[in-house]
Image: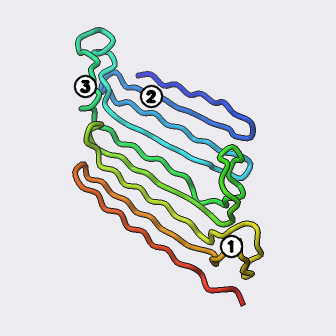
Amino acid sequence: GYSLFAGFSIPGIDIAAHAAWDGRTDDTELAFLSWDRAGVLASATAKSKVPVVAWVTGAKRITRRAIAELDVNATADVPLRNVADLPAFLDLPALRGKLGAHVAVEGEVAHPSLVVSAKAEGLRAENRAAGARSAASSFEPLDALLEARWNGERGVITFALDERAPAA
């Protein structure tokens, strides 16, 4: 098999990537991890059986259908972290609180199942002190949870939002 590891960075963010392929089993894995001064930004991994030798030698053709029929198992995570600590290039609105997410994909590329979870904790407008209401900000810190599932045919989305009580 073959394995490749690469590391590189963009200003303020380090990224490590890994690719591996086992010629006996066609097991293939791609992974990456990114981090900055505040910790892990995101990570992702994808696994599949990819017939690299058969494709390269012409024993099998690389077609849209061949790719669509690959079974994949992939996950991506953005750990819960302070919005203020997220990279500036994301150009997020002026918010305080924490955000995080998880995505999982499994099954054939053409018809995968998908699960998405996203979470917000204590989300509020940045331009006000905790507990102080203003015309520009009419909500107390919010906690939210989004869960979405797709089984290849049907989807379900649940969303919960909770406004915290004003601070005394």
Q: Mark 3 points at which residue?
A: 66
Which of label 2 and label 1 is nearer to you?
1
- Please tell me whether mark 1 sits on a helix, a strand or a loop: loop
Numbered label attached to residue 137:
1
Most extreme residue toward the top, as rendered?
57
**In the image, is residue 49 above or below residue 166?**
above
Upstream in the sequence, badge 3 or badge 1?
3
Numbered label attached to residue 100:
none
- The residues bearing labels 2 and 1 have C-alpha atoms spaced at a distance of 49 Å
Residue under the point 71% across and 76% down = 135
- The residues bearing labels 3 and 1 have C-alpha atoms spaced at a distance of 52 Å
Numbered label attached to residue 20:
2
46 sits left or right of 11 in the view: left
Q: Which quadrant of the figure has residue 13? A: top right
Q: Which quadrant of the figure has residue 163? A: bottom right
Residue under the point 69% across and 68% down = 125
Residue situated in front as seen by the camera: 130 or 62: 130
